[in-house]
Image (cartoon, rainbow, N blue to C red):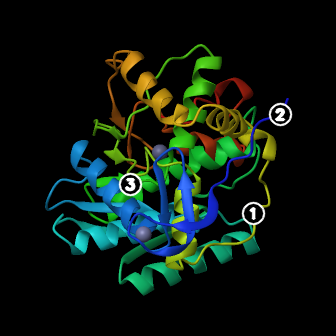
Amino acid sequence: MHFPDRRVEFEGECRCGRRGRLHHLSEIGGPLCEACFPESMRRRVARDIRTYRMIPKGWKAAVALSGGKDSGSLLHILQMLSRGRMNFRVAALHVNTELGEYSERSQQVCEELAASLGVELVVARIGEWGVRVQQTGRFPTCSVCGGLRRPIMAILTRRLGADVLVTGHTLDDQLVYALKDLLSGKANPPRPVTPQGPVFTQKAKPLFHLPDRAPAIYARLVGIPVVEQACPLFIPDTHRFKDVFEALESLAPMAKKQLIRSLSRGLRRPPLPDRPWRLCPECGEPTYYNPCPLCRLRGWQTGQGMTAGELGPLSD
Ligand SMILES: [Zn+2]
Ligand SMILES: [Zn+2]
């Protein structure tokens, strides 16, 4: 099947009157020149932060930095907005996944970016928790990596004294999660903000309405350092659903945005389980399980008293 190519870059005249290279993303409108594009992204992010009360005045936001373009652009945008009238503080955190050269380079890129922006950064290595990114039980490496990084990021958010954990998840990421959920019989409405719970930190996704391409262009135009190599454990197949939405957008411009809106409004979130929570007897972190998912993964990986049936789920 043939899908029309999307022209996202071409020469022309921007609405500001400048001539030159223009960037046109149908998901957000345009086309915009290289001066207007970053400005427009910052305005959009600022609007969503206000609309969804992602980072109220006086709050400290911890940005989860990976070394990639999404979180790098997000940190840059938030740091610029925080210097303006939005009146919140920004810090960053990075979890080194200890996968050799790739992880060291990722950490270096995060340190470089945070230093250039004058942002406080905390770095932790997953080995500090006695765990490794590797296939564990029935869970593939990418799921284990996510299962390890989620609780560690929550711990670092608390260490930073931050009020909210902010991630660089994009419109495309949300659509892929929603589709995977729907295909497995679950119906979770995508949300730009996850409220604080007894176990969970408040989370916000300021790039919720922006496609993958937007932070990529932003990073290039603004000159954000980005790790060039891919994760050595990257499995392209796990990201194949993004092609579904690219094809859809090329056939029906604005479809991605409409779809996320319809899913957010149309799906009903299942009621929160009324489960008791406790402090994990092994690490002391709040959890619904005993021990917490992170300590269970450690137990499994080090072979201390775990059997195949006892591993999972990977998150609270
Ligand atoms: Zn312009
Ligand atoms: Zn624990």
Identify the amino acid type marked 2.
His
Provide residue 256's location: percent of width, then percent of height.
54, 34
Identify the amino acid type marked 1.
Ala
**Which residue sits at x=62%, y=43%?**
297
Q: Which mark is residue 2?
A: 2
Instruction: Name the residue carrying label 3.
Output: 166
User: Which mark is first along the chain, 2 or 3?
Assistant: 2
Residues 266 and 33: in front is 33
Instruction: Find the distance from the CA under tag 1 to the CA under tag 3.
Output: 23 Å
**Which residue sits at x=30%, y=53%?**
164
Answer whether labels 2 and 1 touch (C-beta < 8 Å). no
Residue 120 to residue 182: above or below: below
Instruction: Name the residue carrying label 1.
Output: 230
Instruction: Find the distance from the CA under tag 3 to the CA under tag 2.
Output: 38 Å
The part of the image, by quadrant, that contains residue 39 is bottom left
Residues 293 and 29: in front is 29
Q: Looking at the image, can residue 289 be seen?
A: no
Q: Secondary structure at mark 1?
A: loop
Answer whether labels 3 and 2 touch (C-beta < 8 Å). no
> Label 3: few (<14), some or many (≥20) within 10 Å?
many
User: Which mark is first along the chain, 1 or 2?
Assistant: 2
User: Which mark is first along the chain, 3 or 1?
Assistant: 3
* In front: label 2 or label 1: 2
| Residue 75 left/right relative to 49 | right
Total marks in image: 3
Identify the amino acid type marked 3.
Val
Provide residue 263's location: percent of width, then percent of height.
45, 23
Q: Secondary structure at mark 3?
A: strand
Q: Looking at the image, can residue 54 be seen?
A: yes
Q: Which mark is residue 191?
A: none
Residues 299 and 82: in front is 82
Q: Secondary structure at mark 2?
A: loop
